[in-house]
Amino acid sequence: MAMSQISDAPRPIREPAPENAVVARNVSKHYGPVEALRDLTLEFPRGQLTSLLGPSGCGKTTLLKIIAGLLEPTSGEILVNGEQVTGPGPDRAFVFQDFALLPWANVMRNVAFGLELRGVARSEREAIAERYIRDVGLAGFEDSYPHQLSGGMRQRVGLARALSVDAQVLLMDEPFSAVDEQTRRKFQEDLLALVENENKTFIFVTHSIEEAVYVSDQIAILLPRPSRVSEIIRPSGIRGKGADNIRRDPEYLDIVDRIWASLRSYVE
Amino acid sequence: MRLFGYPLPGMSSLILWGLLWEIVGRLDLTFFLPPLTEVVSTLFAVIGTPAFLKALTETAYAFFAGVFFAVAIGIPTGILMGKSRLLDELLLPWVNMFLSAPLTALVPVLMVLFGFGMKAIIITTTLFAIWIIILNSRAGVLQINRSLVEMARSYGATPLDAFFKIYFWAALPEILGGVRIGVIRAVKGVIIGQLLISIVGFGALFELYANNFLMAHFWAVLVVLFALAFTISEFLAYLERRVSYYAAKR
Ligand SMILES: Nc1ncnc2c1ncn2[C@@H]1O[C@H](COP(=O)(O)OP(=O)(O)O)[C@@H](O)[C@H]1O
Ligand SMILES: [Mg+2]
């Protein structure tokens, strides 16, 4: 995986890549009179999964879209690999809450769509897409259309599309919120494997405390509007204990409790 | 429809109406309505004549040219209106006005502007068809799922990519609905244009038949026109059904 990002062309000598793949610096965002984000600063370490956790409407999607370059911040800046974001770029890929699949295109074309937009030749992009379709467990469904798939399968298509463009940063907006509980657990396990195996930085939005603690290297807790980071938690002790054991781990339960304690005051 | 519990094939009620026509025709109530059988036999006699074929080609030419312009201008205009607030505010009042305007009244003006020929007929046809196509394409774009557009942008789509790979396809069910109604209106437009200008196509033919009281000929040509319009509309309805599988799930 990491090899494919190294091109054959001689590369100019550069400073070592910064430790943080993404940095949000003093980001504010107003929607007219609504102040969604206020002076938010947050760092996203390379190769790790950072969750944005907070109640609905606190600005998680807004922050993610600003990082994606889909929205402009009212003030402040986003740095990806040290460079300021001015719009969408090939270094970031987005996984949408509502999947955002083309309903008129089959799974193959949907997965290859990111590559299609980047001008990759058809045979090449379909070969790549095929591999990721297999990786997410949808082999045999290449010719199915989104309306023939379950919610969980649709999100696998969205995930395969994001993976196949081989971006360094994966932005996931509540990707599992529209799938059923069993599928959701399977997804969370797969996500852990993905973070381990792919050398990518994940930014993961969720409003589920358990989910955040289960999958994250770092959890940023956002408070309700105008949103800023109230706390950063690194559940480092429970990483590497194996997907099956995490949910029984005392530290896991402790962290869930602690987060709930700090969020409960904001829930009537 | 069912008769004594047996399902009847579609449109079998037409047989009933055909019978009624035949009977009324045979009663000789008016010279205006000859029996259906006479109309049908005239139809077969007329259909191969040079006059008819000439009228048919001229009409088809005007019709297809008119529909072509209506589609080629109408769809992009509608999509752009759906995408751009400014364009929408500029154009929407005009589109709505022309959609409901009695366009027939405009035909004489068009004749003055573009002469008594094919050009005026083609423009009449386009004017009849284009407004509903614009309006439907616009409606199709307005209901697009925003996250499809964001998805395309986030994967680096250029505005042109977004237009051809997202907006067009997402709006296609509405666009086809608009084209179907537009085409039906174009049939009206091409015939009305020809009747008013009446020196080309079926307009000339109608003029000829009516002036010579050839009512069977008149009806025969009318039946052909109705059948053609119906066939085209059914074909477009078929295309519409082919994309309807995703119409509800965009
Ligand atoms: N396009 C918009 N126009 C106006 N207000 C918006 C818009 N998008 C989001 N908001 C507001 O900004 C706040 C944050 O929204 P969002 O980022 O979607 O929250 P979250 O993803 O955490 O649920 C909400 O109060 C929402 O109502
Ligand atoms: Mg959200």
Image: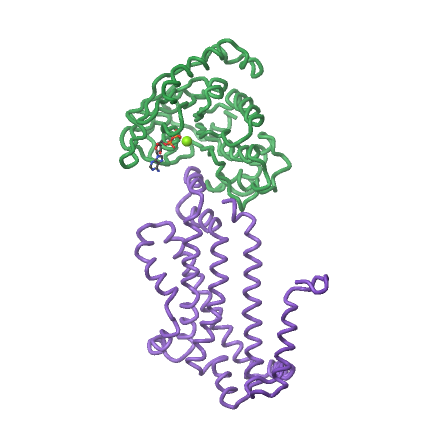
Chain colours: A green, B purple
Residue at position x 60%, y 39% from top?
Answer: A142
What residue occupies the far bottom of the structure in this picture? B212
Q: Is residue A30 above or below residue B178?
A: above
Image quadrant occupied by the C terminus of chain A: top left
Q: Quadrant of ligand 1?
A: top left
Residue at position x 56%, y 13% from top?
Answer: A245
Instruction: Answer left or right for A189 relative to A18.
Output: right
Residue B207 in picture, x, y percent from top left: 48, 85
Residue A224 in picture, x, y percent from top left: 34, 25
Instruction: Answer left or right for A19 relative to B63.
Output: left
Identify which residue, B105 or A46, lies in the foreground. B105
Q: How many marks?
A: 0
Identify which residue, A228 or B15, lies in the foreground. B15
Res A183 → quadrant? top right
Instruction: Answer left or right for B99 relative to B64.
Output: left
Residue at position x 50%, y 57% from top?
Answer: B176
Q: Is residue B240 above or below residue A65?
A: below
Q: Is residue A234 above or below residue B157?
A: above
Residue A115 in picture, x, y percent from top left: 49, 39
Identify which residue, A56 or A100, lies in the foreground. A56
Residue A230 in picture, x, y percent from top left: 34, 18
What residue occupies the far front of the structure in this picture? B4
Instruction: Answer left or right for B105 relative to B231.
Output: left
